[in-house]
Amino acid sequence: MNPLEEMGGENYLPGVSVDNVIFGFHDNQLKVLLLESKNGSHWMLPGGYIQKDESLDTAASRVLLDRTGLKKVFLQQFHVFGDPSRSKESLIKGAIKSLQIDVAKTHWFFNRFITIGYYALVEFEKVIPVPDKHSTSCAWKDIDKLPPLIFDHHEIIDRALVDMRHHLNYQPIGYNLLPREFTMKNLQSIYETILGRKLDRSNFTRKMLASGILDKKEKLYTGGAHKAPFLYSFNKQEYFKVLKEGFNNEF
Amino acid sequence: MNPLEEMGGENYLPGVSVDNVIFGFHDNQLKVLLLESKNGSHWMLPGGYIQKDESLDTAASRVLLDRTGLKKVFLQQFHVFGDPSRSKESLIKGAIKSLQIDVAKTHWFFNRFITIGYYALVEFEKVIPVPDKHSTSCAWKDIDKLPPLIFDHHEIIDRALVDMRHHLNYQPIGYNLLPREFTMKNLQSIYETILGRKLDRSNFTRKMLASGILDKKEKLYTGGAHKAPFLYSFNKQEYFKVLKEGFNNEF
DNA sequence: TCAAAAGTGTTAGCCATACACCCATGC
DNA sequence: GCATGGGTGTATGGCTAACACTTTTGA
């Protein structure tokens, strides 16, 4: 969250925000939902403040709901960013320009801010991106072609990826990120993007099927060229059992 | 950190604290460093506030230094605890009693607090426990025999253990937690305590040696009954290489 | 018919697991 | 000498990595 939003007086915790790294998946590409600043020079993560009587998780959920229209998705706190230099004066002056904020009204934002990073995995097709009052647009960006970002938001996204990579070792992934039915290639692409390397197709399929979290459908995917692949869906019961108890997914 | 310490006016970030779960290892037992409240009814984690110009990590280091006299140890942020219920009025009233605080002087502590959890791994023998101004003693407690703790500090310790368990999968552990020379059983005990289960002695030895982070000493440990075990030390160069690059330690 | 995508099969090698066995030591 | 702690060896099964082969499809 950029610290330049109006605080609304006494309703929020001072000096703390949440920022969401919202991942979606489309065209076999991992994407992040970003907001564009008013003058178009920078982009930023969707973020917000924490109401005095709500939990951190609730605040992050609220931000997610406001920007995407989605509830009940996978949302996980991963790191707090609180280096004093993240609120350096030069950065803030840049942000004032980007966001076209009236400085006279908001003297408080030269104060230091810390932000709690959350990452969310959402179903691309279901998202209706909604800009907030400091942005002119809200859009998906390829994870490997990010535009210039304000403050330390690039670092936050990088860290989300690293932590998610570690979480892959003991958590399944893909539910909430893929539509109800998907191909094995879709799932493999997610893993490859997060891990940053190619995986063997044959071995990946075997491993995923062995974990028991997938149901194979009778139907085949049609629409693409070449041979029609099988469709799969997550076995919700098994998926959440594995999510809770952990599994060894050593890539 | 309990929110009852005096803030020192304008010098600290409002509403935020750090709490350290400081792990030590002695008698083949994992221990946590805790502070005893003034009336002896509760114990708490060493914690503190964040100065306006210091990083979160620096604040945690400062707290660690104040309570143990140690610098340059392994210290890692693992989770933020910010549920509104953690500052419930009933809890705070209990804390006022435990800590024998003058309520008139500190009206502000009915405010909500969030705390950033850090865990530290330190060498037991090197620690000189120092109470803070709200506590009468500072002492090591067995991880599986914890005394009553204030607020959500028990939850914070549990969470530190769980997260540390996950970190074991891609980080070596033991440096800073063991003296310069130690036996394989010492190291295995640490792993077993964190993982909460027994490991096969033979396989553990083989795996550790294969990772290359240990140097085998000529000397043998003497002092115990029965056969004298070998002594090992960490190969600092290899250790930090593995710490940085990660390894697959799948227990 | 051919290239690309997808399904299936196969092999070698590594590693975790679970033991077995032996050695050294103090009681 | 025997129980215990500690060092070493080994058989098994399972998994991974790498790659070959087949099938299907649209261009």
Image (cartoon, coloured by chain):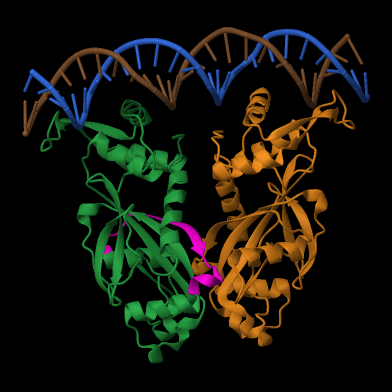
Chain colours: A green, B orange, C blue, D brown
Residue beneath the point at 51% across and 81% down: A111
Residue beneath the point at 65% across and 60% down: B20
Residue beneath the point at 62% across and 34% down: B197
Eyeballing the image, is A138 above or below B245? below
Res. A66 image quadrant? bottom left
Location of residue B81 in the rendering, given as x and y in whole percent from the top left corner: 53, 63
* Quarter of the image where the N terminus of chain A is located: bottom left
Location of residue B25 in the rendering, given as x and y in whole percent from the top left corner: 75, 45
Residue beneath the point at 45% across and 66% down: A152
Front residue of A92 and B11: A92
Q: Is residue A70 magenta?
A: yes
In the image, A248: left or right of B207? left
In the image, A18: left or right of B251? left
Front residue of B85 and B10: B10
Q: Is residue B151 visible?
A: no
In the image, B12: left or right of B216? left
Res. B51 image quadrant? bottom right
Location of residue B193 in the rendering, given as x and y in whole percent from the top left corner: 66, 40
Location of residue A4 in the rendering, given as x and y in whole percent from the top left corner: 40, 79
Q: Is residue B240 magenta?
A: no
Q: Is residue B76 visible?
A: yes
Magenta range is A68-87
Front residue of A142 and A54: A142
Eyeballing the image, is B183 above or below A35? above
Res. A104 image quadrant? bottom left
